[in-house]
């Protein structure tokens, strides 16, 4: 029923001093009863408006605090048989929990930036075509929405600089570009070129100047680099003897001190021959 009818609920004046919110309606037909669910506020009482003028029974379920997984429910119906006639006006008033009360310390101050959301509901009555039935409520506009980017009313989620909800700017590269390819190398240099990345030296220091010599010693002092011995061994101990023989131990020197000479010790242990003139 009421396929051609449209009932609209919207939010009127907000009295933050007395914690009162006006609920407005615009209805082309008669209203005999209604029920709707509200988010964004902690309702403590409902009263007044045309619902009271036309002797509607008003009921508000036990308060559903916004920290709980539930919704505040408001319902009303005529118990005299007299409907609210077609037209517009104030349907009723809502009292909400006082901001600042320690019991309600998570409540939001209701003001220009407050938006209540009627998420679902229905009205029962007579449409403009004279038929009875129930029909879905179209919610009107209110003040600026308090819904965060995650879809939570009064939530704390925010868009980061890349437009990602709760992204924490994780998609920004080191150059400050959203979804960019730049990254910091080991020396803290930011670019997107992997071929110029800073390397670690032999001591593991990024961009350090230490290097390994041929003996595997790592430092940045070129004056103490490992050298080859006479046998070509890096860091070896072999040296040339007095006759120029590597590791020869002067075995090629005769008893007169001449390399490759012919002097020798005789049986009396005298060095004779060669250059000794003996």
Image (cartoon, rainbow, N blue to C red):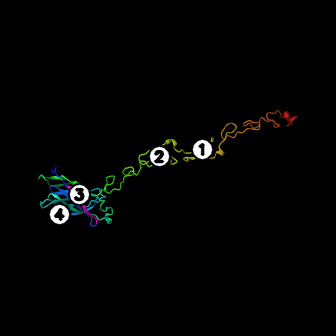
According to the image, label 2 marks what residue? 183
Local SS, label 3: strand
C-beta proximity under 8 Å, tags 2 and 4: no
Span highlighted in magenta in the image: 8-16
Q: Is tag 2's residue or tag 1's residue first in the polypeptide sequence?
A: 2
Report, in whole angstroms, how far the alpha carbon at label 4 lies from the one at label 1: 91 Å
Local SS, label 2: strand
Report, in whole angstroms, how far the alpha carbon at label 2 lies from the one at label 4: 67 Å
Q: Is tag 2's residue or tag 3's residue first in the polypeptide sequence?
A: 3
Q: Is tag 3's residue or tag 4's residue first in the polypeptide sequence?
A: 3
Q: Nearer the viewer, mark 2 or mark 4?
A: 2
Task: Determine crowd level at label 3: few under 14, some 14-19, many 20+ residues with C-alpha closer than 10 A.
Answer: some
Image x and y of residue 19, in percent: 27, 65
Q: Quadrant of residue 15?
A: bottom left
According to the image, label 3 marks what residue? 10
Q: Is residue 168 left or right of residue 139?
A: right
Which residue reaches farthest right? 278
Q: Nearer the viewer, mark 3 or mark 1?
A: 3
Report, in whole angstroms, how far the alpha carbon at label 3 lies from the one at label 1: 76 Å
Q: Is residue 94 left or right of residue 155?
A: left
> Label for residue 211?
1
What predominant SS class does the magenta segment belong to? strand
According to the image, label 4 marks what residue? 52
Determine if residue 266 is in view: no
Task: Determine crowd level at label 4: few under 14, some 14-19, many 20+ residues with C-alpha closer than 10 A.
Answer: some
């Amino acid at each position: 029923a009421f396929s051609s009818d449209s009932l609209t609920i919207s939010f009127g004046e907000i009295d933050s001093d007395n914690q009162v919110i006006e609920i407005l309606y615009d209805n082309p037909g008669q209203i005999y009863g209604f029920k709707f669910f509200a988010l964004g506020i902690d309702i403590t009482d409902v009263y007044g408006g045309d619902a009271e003028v036309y002797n509607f029974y008003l009921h508000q379920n036990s308060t559903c605090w916004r920290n709980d997984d539930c919704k505040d429910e408001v319902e009303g119906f005529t118990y005299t048989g007299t409907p609210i006639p077609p037209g517009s006006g104030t349907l009723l008033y809502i009292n909400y929990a006082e901001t600042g009360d320690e019991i309600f310390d998570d409540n939001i101050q209701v003001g220009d930036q407050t938006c209540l959301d009627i998420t679902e509901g229905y009205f029962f009555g007579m449409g403009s075509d004279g038929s009875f039935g129930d029909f879905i409520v179209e919610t009107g506009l209110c003040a600026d929405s308090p819904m965060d980017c995650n879809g939570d009313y009064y939530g704390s989620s925010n868009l980061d600089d890349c437009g990602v909800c709760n992204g924490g700017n994780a998609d920004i590269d080191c150059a400050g570009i959203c979804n960019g390819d730049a990254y910091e190398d080991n020396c803290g240099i930011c670019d997107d070129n992997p071929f110029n990345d800073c390397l670690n030296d032999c001591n593991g220091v990024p961009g350090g100047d230490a290097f390994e010599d041929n003996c595997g010693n790592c430092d940045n002092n070129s004056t103490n680099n490992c050298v080859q011995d006479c046998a070509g061994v890096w860091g070896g101990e072999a040296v040339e003897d007095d006759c120029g023989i590597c590791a020869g131990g002067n075995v090629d020197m005769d008893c007169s001190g001449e390399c490759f000479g012919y002097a020798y010790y005789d049986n009396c242990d005298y060095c004779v021959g060669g250059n000794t003139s003996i």
